[in-house]
Image (cartoon, coloured by chain):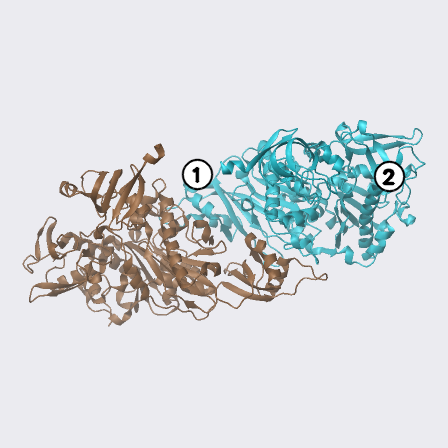
Chain colours: A brown, B cyan
């Protein structure tokens, strides 16, 4: 009876998900255990106010405070990360506070195909027609298989106990006609050049030659996965979902902070593993039973995501001097970290360059192919943590810049992810002095996403409503008004908005955007100058990552996020990280190239690089203090 | 209530061990689950009659049959392997039916020390004083450790996830002063010659340099284990116990048969693992906490024992053409097969030559050292399965011969293992026409062990009571009498015997001994002749294994088990298998030598070798039909 008492029933609306929670647990944690994503940009620290929920019935242990006004409290609003379970309750999670995964389904469909010059996966299958043992040849089963593999150039192979245990029966039931799967450890330059590897499975020879690799991109926000049929080289459609860790903070820093709590690391590890497992369940719909025939998974993520996936404490990533525990990962057993894959499946994580230039960038550079071309290329992945690579086939430099969360809707009063309800497109009519909104999902707007923010500010700048300093001209439009944080622009009045509140863009929001774009731009400048070149010398700009998909190039140049180069020099490669994983799965030599890329990359710590701070300060204008930089360059 | 009903309580005497057993389980299985060893030479097939127990109270489901007379049945005797649990019962396990482990304690004390030329274990520890990271050097933790190891010649190292997870904290809490344990994969000749390996653990530098390897000999009858301090090269005293599998059959064939039953393989695997785990518990008494500092275990056993330990089905070992699943074992994770060792501990099993010349022989040859000397050597391990190696530093040949169970007390009416109550020594006084018995443990005799059998027959042969054909002369001694199997010799009358029965030696017993010694002798002959030599050319005879310990050389020559060579050519090396494991633990290069020995060994299948059968037939006399062979040779 005592034990029963300790658990309290919470019902979450509108999904009607019931969760039994111990008294004292936060509503955020309880919702999360029930599989419901609630925004918590700050990682549940109670300082972002994004996890607002409505108490419909019952009671929770909470009080008003800095991020929850007396008035909101009286309207039964609560911060999910601060409210504690006390008695049975019904709690409504409003749209603004929800992580909505449906957008990813659409984006996944647009996912591009990837190919390699020659299909040469590190996992190969060999069909062996063995001579059955006889009194004149009673070599052991394993030596018999090894000898036949050796004839095919596969030598010095290790083998798992599980394979050894099933092999004798498999050999005999198949009449010594078997298919042997071998994972080759490719020769590193430093080694003698002789490959070795591991016998992964021995199965009866059959007519189905298909076998698979898995490619996984572990993004801070979303996780993508796809299967690659290694027999044909076909990359199957990718699937994606929100990274379940998102309930514990939207950026890597909040995740690292959360991981230092008791059980925090374990919980974050479990979250991302669960997310991948859910994707695997969906892949099961594409290829039933693929797990049995999947022998390797290539995964890429930023340095923090890689550590959290592997369950290695990422704490030191954010402590000076920013040393990651691991840069090059050993091969892991996928099932060991909790992935629902067979014990025979190896997990290979892309190496990272530094604490903030991770495996996803190495993987993206691999996918983009510029590391083997002559033209000088700028490769960027825009986000809270923006990554920049500049180089060509002769040299590679990279840097990470902390742009802040503006591109992902953070630090912006009505900022949100690029999900239904987000204002993405914006057109201002100077004649009528009004605007037209493009909202994701054609629904009433509830906020503004990162690319929308760029589009709105660029258009307001062109219309003279926002000046070079990012300040409003109160006389330029009737929609500019005085708000609680100074001047603001009314994007959508309460009556037309999903949240029942005026959706506005404040000068503080614009300041945050300028800070973010300036951090990126001064990053490119620093790297370009470090090698004695100018921005105009960039022959190619490759944009990777989910953010780039909806980026309006002209607007991004207008606000000074991208350099003022001819538009044809820009190339969007989508999820470069997933593509790089796909390529590594298809080609063992390309996996070695990935490791070469890591070794060749010279990492710049921008904060330690002379001149960066000056460039950053100079970039805090629209588009820049140095107008010459934004005359069309390199035309 | 239903569930309760299904379990029935059995009490085993004299230990008063209570076991709850399901109805229908055999008394043998129930006793075994209670940790009680009952003899079952035939593997519980009901055909050896060695597992006789006495029903003191209650009832079991059993009936008289071929191996249980109506009379014995009426005296409440039952075969434990046939009697099934039906109702609560009290069951007495008589001394004759018990596996007694106490003997091993004594034998372990006599265990000799082993040494190698240079202490060079494949597991090494490096003390690293690392430069802590700073802004100018933010190499990852793993790369920092790897770079320092590389300076000590340790390159291309893999690392476990568990080590990665603990490493960041260990580095910082120790001020970057750590002790790194590395398991080197030693270069095989075929490889490029460059060693690689695995970082096994990273721990704070401390003052205790001790770290350990484990040596384990997995015998069919008994299991031995010892720790080796790799920092000093000291081999600690060994401990031993009966192999728990003994309740499922005394020889490898009955074990293989048992392993084919449902759950049989799993049960036998569990038994041997439990036996080793019990020994580990005892080693904990020698070196508390040794598991944390033990990184590798070397184990050797015959081919069947190796497979059962690893849980690989040994069925094909006894099916023509006698192909073992595995001859060379990959490194295993000790904890994976159930050994109670840390996850960082690797298990290395000695390779075997063939289905019946196993890793224990390779290990023993390694320990004996004759593979690198010039003198022609015969190496033998006498047992149910006798192994023979002949050769020197230039060549090695080997064979297994199925001697039958006589040396271990099997197939002999009062045969038993060398345990308390076994007649071991025997002196006949022709004047008084009576004898003196030497009994292990100085207790009333309950049977005769293998070495005792040799001593008794040799003495009776010298006294003219047994003739060349192994038949009794009824007039030579009043102790020869007519028994139910023909003539027999009364070793001990019922009144003086532990079992309350006359202990006798029958002509059938002697026949079995002659068969066994003849199988061994014709084996040596075949190998010696195969290389064009004669028995007299043998410069050294090395006897290994528990049986050799109590072997009287002169008597063994008298009956024709050993060749008639000067006694100083014989050398007893004790548990060669355990010594070989010890040596491999102390020296990585010696482990490679073990693999070389395996490769150099030419295996003879005696049954397929022309001339063996003729030699076998000719050997079926005492000492041999060819008396010239037993004139003193090579003197």
Q: Mark 2 lies on which chain?
A: B
In the rendered view, would you say B282 is above or below B321?
above
Gap in angstroms between the C-alphas marked 1 and 2: 68 Å
Decide if residue A266 is in sight here. Answer: yes
**Residue at mark 1 shares a chain with residue at mark 2:** yes
Q: Residue A617: x percent and y percent?
A: 20, 54
Between B316 and A477, the one lying in front of the other is: B316
Q: Residue at x 88, y 43 (%)?
A: B470
Q: Residue B174 carries which label?
A: 1
Q: In this view, does B139 lie to the left or right of B180?
A: left
Residue bearing mark 2: B458
- Say which quadrant the C terminus of chain B sits in: top right
Of marks 1 and 2, which one's residue comes earlier in the chain?
1
Query: Mark 1 or 2, which is nearer the eye?
Result: 2
What chain does mark 1 sit on? B
Q: Position of residue B59 (x, y in %)?
A: 64, 34
Answer few, some or many: residues within 10 Å of disc 1's Cα (few below 14, many 20 plus, some between 14 and 19): some
Quadrant for residue B70, please give it.
Answer: top right
Query: Which residue is found at the position 42% from the left and 63% from the top?
Result: A287
């Amino acid at each position: 009876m005592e034990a029963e008492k300790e658990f309290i029933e919470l019902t979450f609306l509108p999904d009607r998900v019931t969760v039994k929670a111990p008294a004292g647990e936060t509503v955020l944690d309880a919702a999360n255990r029930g599989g419901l994503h609630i925004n918590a940009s700050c990682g549940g620290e109670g300082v972002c106010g994004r996890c607002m929920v409505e108490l419909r019935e019952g009671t929770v242990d909470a009080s008003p405070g800095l991020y929850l006004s007396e008035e909101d409290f009286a309207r039964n609003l609560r911060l999910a990360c601060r409210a504690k379970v006390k008695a049975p309750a019904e709690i409504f999670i409003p749209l603004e506070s929800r992580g909505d995964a449906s957008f990813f389904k659409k984006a996944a469909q647009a996912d591009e195909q990837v190919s390699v010059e020659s299909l040469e996966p590190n996992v190969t299958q060999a069909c062996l027609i063995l001579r059955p043992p006889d009194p004149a040849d009673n070599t052991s089963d394993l030596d018999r298989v090894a000898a036949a593999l050796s004839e095919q150039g596969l030598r010095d192979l290790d083998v798992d106990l599980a394979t050894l245990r099933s092999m004798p029966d498999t050999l005999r039931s198949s009449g010594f006609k078997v298919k042997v799967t071998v994972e080759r450890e490719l020769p590193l330059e430093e080694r003698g050049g002789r490959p070795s590897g591991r016998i992964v499975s021995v199965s009866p020879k059959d007519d189905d030659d298909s076998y698979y690799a898995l490619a996984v991109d572990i993004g801070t926000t979303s996780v993508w996965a796809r299967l690659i049929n290694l027999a044909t080289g076909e990359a199957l459609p990718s699937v994606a979902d929100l990274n379940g860790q998102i309930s514990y903070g939207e950026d890597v820093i909040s995740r690292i902070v959360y991981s230092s709590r008791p059980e925090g690391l374990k919980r974050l590890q479990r979250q991302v593993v669960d997310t991948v497992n859910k994707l695997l369940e969906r892949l099961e719909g594409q290829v039933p039973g693929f797990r049995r025939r999947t022998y390797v998974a290539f995964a890429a993520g930023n340095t923090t995501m890689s550590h959290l996936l592997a369950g290695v404490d990422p704490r030191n990533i954010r402590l000076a001097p920013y040393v990651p525990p691991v840069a090059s990962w050993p091969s892991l057993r996928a099932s060991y970290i909790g992935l629902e894959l067979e014990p025979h499946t190896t997990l290979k994580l892309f190496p990272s360059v530094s604490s903030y230039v991770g495996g996803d960038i190495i993987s993206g550079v691999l996918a983009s192919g510029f590391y083997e071309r002559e033209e000088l290329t700028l490769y960027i992945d825009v986000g809270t943590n923006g990554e920049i690579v500049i180089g060509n086939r002769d040299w590679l430099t990279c840097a990470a810049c902390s742009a802040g969360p503006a591109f992902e809707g953070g630090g912006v009063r009505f900022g949100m992810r690029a999900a239904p309800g987000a204002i993405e497109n914006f057109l201002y009519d100077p004649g009528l002095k009004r605007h037209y909104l493009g909202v994701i999902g054609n629904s009433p707007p509830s906020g503004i996403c990162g690319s929308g923010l760029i589009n709105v500010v660029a258009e307001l700048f062109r219309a003279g409503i926002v000046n070079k300093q990012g300040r409003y001209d109160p006389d330029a439009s009737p929609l500019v008004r005085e708000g609680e944080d100074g001047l603001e622009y009314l994007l959508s009045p309460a009556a037309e908005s999903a949240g029942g509140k005026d959706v506005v863009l404040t000068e503080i929001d614009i300041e945050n955007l300028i800070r973010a774009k300036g951090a990126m731009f001064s990053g490119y400048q620093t790297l370009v100058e470090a090698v004695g070149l100018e921005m105009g010398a960039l022959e190619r700009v490759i944009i990777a990552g989910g953010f780039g998909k909806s980026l309006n190039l002209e607007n991004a140049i207008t606000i000074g996020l991208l350099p003022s180069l001819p538009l044809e020099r820009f190339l969007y490669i989508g999820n470069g990280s997933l593509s790089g994983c796909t390529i590594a799965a298809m080609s063992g030599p390309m996996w070695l190239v990935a490791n070469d890329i890591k070794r060749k990359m010279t990492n710049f710590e921008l904060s330690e690089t002379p001149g960066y701070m000056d460039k950053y300060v100079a970039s805090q204008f629209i588009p820049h203090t140095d107008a010459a930089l934004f005359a069309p360059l390199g035309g």
